[in-house]
Amino acid sequence: MSRVWGRYLEKLYSRAGGSRDAAFDQLMNLRHDPDQIAWLELVAASRTEPMLRRVVERAQRDLDSHAINAQRQLLHVDGPAAEAKLQVVSDLVRLLLDALTLSVISVDRDQRIEALLHAFSTMLTHYWQTPSRAAKS
């Protein structure tokens, strides 16, 4: 898993001025990566194996830290309100990536996933651009 995220983060860091859309698309392409698929199989197996669970949790914490730092740089996060939004966006994107990696959509799979990615990306952009509730108070 470190190799998968390492490749993604390396590309993300090298393009600090790149667009959010390009970074999102690149991350969603990880759903085809054999290492990502193997990682999710380990995550599933760790639910019933305590020793494996500790290893997976430790690896996930390290990966989450690297991912948040890369996203913080890409999105130019500055301040607590933006930091809170970043955490929500990061969690949503990871949940979507995991869901798409494990997806069993079989009818019109490519078209449906592309439509889903477009809708999700649009929602994230809107969420990111909307002032946080804390700023409105």
Image (cartoon, grey):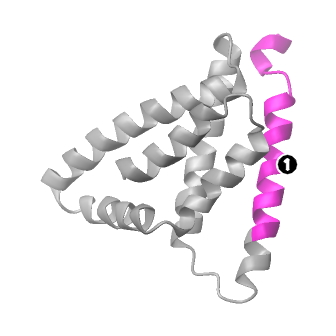
Q: 100 or 16, which is in the foreground?
A: 16
Q: Name above or below for residue 55 compared with residue 103.
A: above
The vertical placement of 113 against 97, above or below, is below
Is 67 displayed left or right of 106 in the figure?
left
Which of the 4 image quarters holds residue 71? Answer: top right
Q: Nearer the viewer, residue 29 or 54?
A: 29
Q: What residue do we see at 80% from left, 77% from top? A: 111
Q: Position of residue 27 (x, y in %)?
A: 61, 51
Residue furthest toward the left? 51
Quadrant of the rendered image containing residue 36: bottom left
For the point 33% across and 64% down, which residue is it?
A: 44
Secondary structure, mark 1, is helix
Q: Determine if the magenta segment contains residue 83.
A: no
Residue located 65% across and 88% down the image: 106
Quadrant into which the C terminus falls: top right
Circle 1 residue = 122
Whole-percent x, y for residue 115 in the image: 82, 68
- Furthest toward the bottom, the residue is 107
Q: How many marks?
A: 1
Q: Residue furthest front?
A: 14
Neighbours of disc 1 within 10 Å: few (<14), some (14-19), many (20+):
few
Mainly helix, strand or loop, the magenta region?
A: helix
Please name the residue shown 63% across and 24% down the image. 73
Residue 119 is one of the magenta-drawn residues: yes
At which x and y percent is residue 19? Answer: 78, 38
Across and down, in percent, residue 23 comes to 68, 44
Rendered position, 66 above or below 55? above
Q: Amino acid at mark 1?
A: Thr
In the rendered image, which quarter is residue 28 located in?
A: bottom right
Residue range (magenta)? 114-137
For residue 4, side relative to residue 54 (left or right):
right
